[in-house]
Image: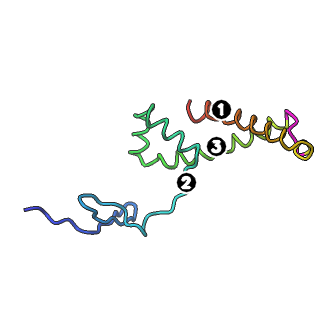
Amino acid sequence: MMEQLARFIADERTGLKYELCGDYYIIAGEDEPEREPIGVWGRRHLNYIQKHCKPFYNKMLNEHTLYDYLLQLNRDAEDTFNRLVKQIAEREGVTDKLKEDNQMEWVARMNNIRNRATEIVNHDMIYP
């Protein structure tokens, strides 16, 4: 005879409630904590470490530090990207004056700058 499982259980360590769904417990909807999204840079790095750095990924996952790591990486990558775009635009003379005088030229040059900044962030931080 199979043992009857409780419909709801609580994890005292996290304070979350879980509901039995089939053979598995999942977080009960309203008690699920609100989290800041890890962002595009964090998701890219997550995909990278899942495929190419499995021991590191598993260690972070088991220690429950993966989310915080990815969130911080996303913030750092976003800051670096924005700083690079601003610095390159200033160095190359892509200014608001150019935007007023020749909008299409400004858009083309800014797209080029953003693409280069993305490549730098990807190379240095996301896919090391």
Which mark is first along the chain, 3 or 1? 3
Structural distance between the alpha carbons of marks 1 and 3: 15 Å
Which mark is first along the chain, 2 or 1? 2
Structural distance between the alpha carbons of marks 1 and 2: 22 Å
Q: Residue at x 23, y 68 (%)?
A: 6
In this view, the residue in front, 47 or 104, is: 104
Which mark is first along the chain, 3 or 2? 2
Q: Which residue is mark 3?
A: 76
Badge 3 marks a residue whose secondary structure is helix
Residue type, mark 3 in image? Asp
Closest to the camera, between mark 2 and mark 3, is: 2
Closest to the camera, between mark 1 and mark 3, is: 1
Q: Is 40 on the left-hand or right-hand side of 94?
A: left
Q: Which residue is mark 2?
A: 37
Viewport quadrant of the C terminus: top right
Q: Is 43 on the left-hand or right-hand side of 14?
A: right
Structural distance between the alpha carbons of marks 2 and 3: 14 Å
The correct choice, above or below, for 91 with respect to 71 in the image is above
Rendering coords of residue 92 (x, y %): 85, 33
Rendering coords of residue 91 (x, y %): 85, 33
Rendering coords of residue 90 (x, y %): 85, 37
Viewport quadrant of the N terminus: bottom left
Mark 2 packing: few (<14 Cα in 10 Å), some, or many (20+)? few
Q: Residue at x 40, y 61 (%)?
A: 14
> Hey, which quadrant is residue 102 in on the image?
top right
- Magenta-colored segment: predominant secondary structure: loop
Extent of the magenta region: 91-96
Q: Which residue is mark 1?
A: 119
Residue type, mark 2 in image? Pro
The correct choice, above or below, for 45 with respect to 30 in the image is above
Residue type, mark 1 in image? Glu
The correct choice, above or below, for 74 with respect to 121 in the image is below
